[in-house]
Structures are given as structure tokens and as C-alpha cells.
Amino acid sequence: METRLSITTSYSLLWGTMQPRLLFDRLKQWNVKKVAVTDRDSLCGYPACREEAQRCDIELICAAALTEGDGEIHAFVQNQKGYEKLCLLLTKRAEDGAFSYLPSLLADSEGLVLATSSPTLLATLAKSKADLYAAVTPSCLASVQTARRLGLRLLACDDALLLEKEDEEVHRILRCMALHKTVGSLQKEDCSVSSNVLLDSEKWNQAFSCWPEAVHNARKLAAYNPFPSSLIFPDYPVEDSAQELEKRVLSGAEIRYGEVNDAILERITYELHIIGSKGFAPYFLVMHDIVQMSSRTCGRGSGAASIVSYCLFITNVDPLAHHLYFERFLSPSRLDPPDIDVDFAWDERDGVFAAVFERFGREHCARVANHNSFRLRGAVRETGRCFGLSDTQISEAEKRLFISGLKDLDDPLWQTICRIATKLEGLPKEISMHCGGLVITPRPVYCYAPLRLSSDGYPLLAWEKEGTEMAGFVKIDLLGNRSLAVIRDTLENLEEEQIHIDQRLWHPTEDAPTIAALARGDSMGVFYIESPAMRQLQKKTGRGDFEHIVIHSSIIRPAANKFIAEYVERLRGKMWEPLHPRLAYILDETYGILCYQEDVSKTAVALAGFSESDADKLRKVIAKKAGGEKLKVYRQQFFDGCSANNVSEETTRIIWEMMLSFDGYSFCKPHSASYAMVSFQSAYLRVHHPSHFMAAVLSNQGGYYRSQAYISEARRMGIHVEGPDINHSRILYHAQGNTLFIGLMAVANLTCQAREQILEERKKRGPFTDLKDASSRLSLCREDWVSLVESGCCDSLGPQYRRSEQLRILLTNAVRNTSSDQLELFSPEKHIPVQTRALVQVKRTEDELHREFSALGFLRTSHPLLLWSQYLKGLKRVKASELGRHRGRYVNLIGYQITQKQVMTKGGQSMSFVSFEDETALYETVLFPDLYQRFYPLLSTLWPLVVFGLVQDDQGALVVEVQHLRKVGS
């Protein structure tokens, strides 16, 4: 049985070149049965290598290369104590680059087998009780003499860095990136001493023919699996966690339902039994504690199907009322751990993380990592820099490369760059922190996995999401959501005006005006359903009730586009038959269209006889775009199962194609329902309290659109927009009655200190009376005064002045007030004359308006098209608000771009959906590939365009098929 030890993979970041999949395919081909991957000071790649080893039926030894000076100590895990020791050592090195492994290994290395080819390190380690070997490799026998002298055993190790000799150039480029050097400045010592290629079996046996003892010793090493067979749950400090959970759930049920009837109690009892039998009670208690750390939360994912989660206020959708499928979350046969993602207001999430670490202990909490890999564009740029090219040179070549292809780049240097970049694509590049992943453990986290520190000081697991779950951790996702902050801020703003909404009696899903607004697609600013595609779908269907919003939130996924038109037709009355009689009861509520993730699992069970477990695995393979061999196996299983159940091949093919539309981005129904509830809360506030809602949307800087688009929408909604104003604006946007006050946060280049000083001064001594008063009371730098004046913040203090005069008065008076006290003692007081004028608002000049737009991103009182009014005079055009009267006709429109979405056709061509607006309304357009190729440069600027196109009625939603674009004034 051939064993290979000490192989370096690409998870030795910016050093190794061998991808685990390719490596293990090669080793399987050579009939290797046992492998130890020893990446440098890291176990980052262990889960990925473990998965590949299992696929290839190869035993994997958990190991790492511990760098010490110029040498390496290979540490092979042989039992749990050795694994925990290795994790602790790697954690200490990650936290302190100067940390030396030697003192710890000399003191205690139980559970580890150590090997090194360095005579110096051998001599040092030989003084301890370590299970020590002298490593011999195909290219290094330096340790043999020392081993003989010290009486140490030999161990056959590998010093291969490359899968192919041609990969040496990749290693050199990786080292350039790591050291921020160019190829020309790279030194010999910057790279690996041995850039050897992985030997095939024949050459390997030949290399060690003289060292049979070393080969025999390698075979003796145990392939210990350090990952636990049970899940790693946090402890909860109560005597009986199941009993405590039941108590909290029943208490919450009384609040949620008022009266707990038999149906409710039966569902609670059923869920608690499954939760208790699986030992998950502590997890739910922990989640209950966490959601109480913030003002508003939205529990989502499959966990929203749980009445236990609902009664603990982890989720906010009643699973009984909305027929949510609990078994998608937990079931007796389901092996996965509970998975509840919780959204918090985006600006409270950091505080929640801090509270969690304090509540459960820093040693027991860690964030989850992201493994960021090279993408082709980034790899091209990085490689170009390594060859000494400037960003300008790279950008110029990049445009040609990604538009015309490599054939237009005949420069030998760029041929080399592209060749290397192609090899870099997919290699891990760096480790960052997952935006919300967190684990909590009963023992210190480093007992289960190596840690490092994130850039902001959090303990960080070495593994990403999949590796974390493979290791047995139950991952908790705490994510930021701007719309929760929008709802919170709207309600707080309303409270200021003595308008109170009782959360317990608030049922926005039952509000008729809200439902009607959503049916019209009036949802800009509304969580998750404000995108152009979603608003168009709302207009097509004319449905705004909760059940249909849940469907639309899920079916809007990109890969399902071709099924959406059929869905709309069926919803509007088209006769349809289920794809197969067995699917009638499964897909009836979604008009026979697969809509939710669990529809994939249910279909596989109903038609092809999949087990619940296999069906869920199929769903995961499709959702993660895993593809490849796994998907082929499941496809064959599905087609065979359907055939056995007498499902026609044509029907099977259609259903399989629909199932594949769930690749990448899709939701389960509980998740969609959770999002739809937040959508309804947002929509209710937009309908009944529009000014307060839009102020909160703008304050939280979230959503699909720029601030200017929301300001325009606010005006279309009949909201009066004021400011920004030095006397009335707060830092954030706010509303009073039907007036929306622009916040000081909107003013570009205005410092935080200036904003705070303005508010503090107003609080202390009241509003500013005029320009002189403001400049005498505020100690601001020139740049802050310029920002305030150009944005119009000071117009109310001197409406009779041009803004240049406002600035002169402010700066002159400010200079006088900052003169030295000594000079003022000996100088007579000088009064700066201020010309008095009637307080009549002067008309703003074109230059002032352009500066205002630069300062705010929008105009205070008008649409930005006012800036191009000289070009619009005499231009024959149709107003966007009148498009409905021009169906089937060609029209000229003015288009101020709001947003665009570029997509790829089946043939790999780019096309684009662009949202424009004029002074009257928003409208949607489409540029098909040939036109997009001609006009896409015009879409990269904010200059308004003359849009010529055909107005089409797409199932009740208007869209302009663009025929021509040109800049206004050209």
C-alpha cells in the first residue's frame, strides 16, 4: 500500500500550486492509499482535502508543516490529544508570527508524530520525548547522517511542490504577490528551495529503493479522523435545557397566539419532541438569548417553518397560518443540524456580535472564514503587476482581452500573463471573515479547530462554511439587514409625532391599501420587492397579497426567468395541467411551477422514489452549483426512478430542467415567507406614513437605487422635500408631517465633526440667525464651509445672497474670530461690513446648481434634468408618465439612468435591462445584445440620454425595447 506524506497544496497560501481535486485524482490514478497533506502553518485545506480523499477512497492523515527558521517540522496527528495540540500551536502562530513551536513541542508533543529533514531541528527535538523521525525526501537526504548519530528512525516524505514542471512559473508569481515584488526583483531565497514535481509510482519507488525502512515507517502512520461524530453545540447553563425550552416556548405561545388551542399545542409538542431527541434544545436557548440583544430581528431560512422558533421570537411568520413545511428544517431522518439565519438591523449587528462574545465567552466563540479564490480578471491584473505593468497598461489590455479575446493580444508578455492567470484561477488567495457566520462551543474553540485573528480582532476559524459544518460545528448566521433599520427608524420617527403602532396588533398583511399598492408595483424602497424585475412582476400579476408575495420572492430567481411568463399566464387564467398527477398536490399553490427549494426534494420523492435524505442531497447539489460527477449520478437516479414509476421521458426531462433552475440562488418557502413579512411591514409604512418611511430609507443608504432615485420617488409620492438646512437638518434624514428633511449626511465632504458640532451648537444656543451668527458660533474648516454652502445648507441664513457671497461672508467672519487673542488686545475692533439686501430668494445660477448636484447627488428642489434644460428645449419627446398611451408605438424619451442590470444570453452574449426616469415617472427598457454592444459606453455615465424605442406591453407591464441611444445635446 503506497503512502505519500508531506504534500504541499494550494492551501499553503501564495506558495503552493496543487489544487486538491487534481492532486487526489492523480494519486488515485497511481493507486496511492494513504496521504498526509502538510500545508505551511495551516490546516485551512484539511476539509477540502478530506472531501477529495473520501471521493477517491484514500485515507487522509491530518497534518501540517510547522515552519521554524529556514526549516520545517512535519506534525502528523495520531489521536485527539495530538489534534488539539496541533490546533493550539497553529492558533498561537497565527496570532503571533514570532511564536516558536519548539518550546511547546519540547515540553509536550503527545499524540503527534514529528519529522524534519533539518539536522539542526532534529538535534534539538531529539532532546525531548517526541515521537520523532528523520525525514528523507526524493531530493534531500541531509537528515540521514544526523539520524544515524542520534539513533532516529527514517520517514519517507515528499518535497513535491508542483503537479507539473510548468507550474513553477505559477509558484514564482504567487511569491511575487506575497512579497509585493516583481518577477525581476524576486530573489532565490524568496521561493521554495525544492520546486520538485510530484513523482509517479515508478519514480517514487525508485527514489526510495535504498530506504525501505523509511517507506515502511510511513505506512505505519495512522490516518486519525479528528472530526467528531456528533455535533458541536454550545452548552447552556441550566439544569434541564429541554424543560427550560418548553417553558419559554409555551410562554411565548401565549404572547403570539393569545389562546393556545389544541392544534398549536400539538405542533409545539411534535417539534419539541424532535428537538429534544436530537439534543438541540441548547441551540434554541442560545438563539433565544441572541435575538433579544437587538431591537428588531428577522429569523429566516428553513428555521422559519418552526413554531418553536416563532414562539421564541427568533422568527416572525406563523408556520401554521402559512402552511410551512417543518420537515424542511428538522425531521427524525434528517441528519443536518438546525440552521437558522437571523437578520439584525445593519447598524446594530456589530453590537450583537460583541454582546454574544461577552455573553458566551471569547474563548468559546469564533467567526467563520471565507476562502477567497483567484478569479480570472483579478488573476490577470495581479499577474500583470508582478511583471511590472502599471494599472493603466493592464486596464487597456484588459478591455481588449475581455471584449475581443486573447487572439487580439499578440504580445508575448501578455500571452504569458494570460497563461499564468488561467492557472491561478480557482486557487485560494486569502482568508477573510464571513459576514455573519459564528460558532459557539462548549470547550475553547481551539480544542476543535485552529484559529487566527480577523482584521478587526475577532477569533476566526481557519475554515469556511462547508469546512465548518464538516467539522461538526453548528454554524449560526447573524446578518445585517438595512430594511430592519428602516422599519425601526420609521417607527421611532413616528413616535416623535405621537403616532404609535402597537407591534402586537400590527397586521400589515391584512391591510387593503398595502395589498393594492403592492399589486400596482408601487414598492420603491420596500424590502426585497423594489427591484425593477420585481416591480414589473407585480404589475404583470396584479397580486399584492401575502401568499403571492411569498411566491414572487422565490420565483424571481434569475435561472427561473423562462418559467415566470408561464406562471403569469396561469395566474391570469390560462388552463393548465400538472406536470404529472403525483405533483398536483405538491405544486398546486404555485400553479404547477416548481418555486421553492423544497419543491425539488418533494418532486424527487414523489416521482423518482428518492428517500428524504437523498432528495435533500440532490437539492443541495443543485443549489450549490456543484454539478460534475455528483449531479450526473443524481440525474441518472432521477431518470431511472421516474422510468420505474412510468413517468414519460419527455415529462422527466421537462421536470429535470425546471429543477435545474434552482442552481445558485433560490429560497425555501419559510425563507420567502420571512422576507415577505418584512416586505409587508415596509410596504405598510410606505403607504400610510410615506414621508417618514422614505426618510428612513434614505438615512440607511440601503436598497436598490441611489439617493437621487428615492428623492425623485418621494416627490412623485407627493412628499414635500426640504433641505439640507443648517437650522433644520439632523445628521440623518427625518420627517415631520408630509415634509421630508434631507440630513446633513447627504452633504459630500462634510466631516463628521462638523455635523456633530452644528447639532451640538443648535442644542446649546438655539438656531442660527444669519450667516455672521453661524460663522461666529461654529469653528469649521474652510472645506466644511464650502460643502455647506454649495449644498445650499446656508441658503436660509442669507437667501438674498449668491452662494459665493455666502461663502465670502462666512469665511471672512470666521477668519476674524480665529485671529490671535494677542493681536485683538492691541488692535481696535474692526467691523466687517456686510451688505444688506432685501430678504428675497435669489434664483440659483447654472453653476450653483451644478455645484449643488456635485455636493448632494441630486437637486434640492428639482429633478437633475434641470441641469440639461438648455438641451431639452424644442426636443420632441413623450413624457414617461404618458407611456401607457403609446403601446406598440415608437417613441422618443429622455432617460436619466437609475440602475441597470447586465445579463448573459444562452449564447453567451451580453444584454442589459436599464431603468430610466424623466421628470414625471420611472420606466423600464431593454437593450438586446446587438444594441448593447453599440451603446454600452453611454450607460457608464450620468449624462441623460435620448432614448428611442418601441413601447411593448409585456403581460401588463410596459417596457421600451431600445432602438437607439444618444447623449442629450449631441
Image (cartoon, rainbow, N blue to C red):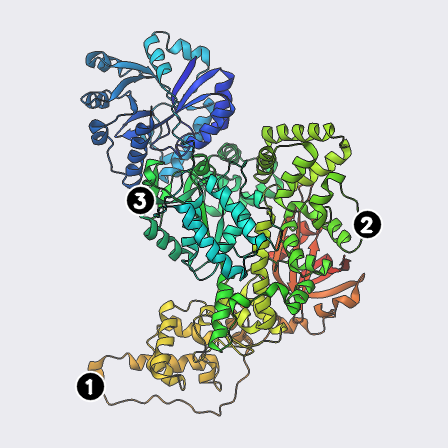
> Which structural element holds mark 3?
helix
Could you tell me how far apart the alpha carbons at marks 2 and 1 are, in whole angstroms?
93 Å
Name the N-terminal-most of marks 3 and 1: 3
* Residue 896 showing in the rendered view: yes
| Three-letter residue code for mark 3 | Glu
* Residue 968 showing in the rendered view: no
Task: Say which mark, if any, is on residue 472.
Answer: none
> Which structural element holds mark 1?
helix
Answer with left or right where residue 672 lies relative to residue 388.
right
Name the N-terminal-most of marks 2 and 1: 2
Name the N-terminal-most of marks 3 and 2: 3
Estimate the x, y position of residue 918 in percent, counting from the top left: 66, 68
Residue picked out by circle 2: 575
Q: Nearer the viewer, residue 178 or 275?
A: 275
Residue picked out by circle 3: 363
Label 1: few (<14), some (14–19) or many (≥20) C-alpha neighbours in 10 Å: few
Q: Which of 354 and 899 is in front in this view?
A: 354
**In the rendered image, which quarter is residue 462 located in?**
top left
| Three-letter residue code for mark 1 | Leu
Answer with left or right where residue 57 lies relative to residue 601.
left
Contact? badges 3 and 2 (CB < 8 Å):
no
Q: Nearer the viewer, residue 900 or 621?
A: 621
Instruction: Classify 403 as above or below 938.
Output: above
Q: Residue at x 59, y 62 (%)?
A: 680
Q: Which of 262 and 337 is in front in this view?
A: 262
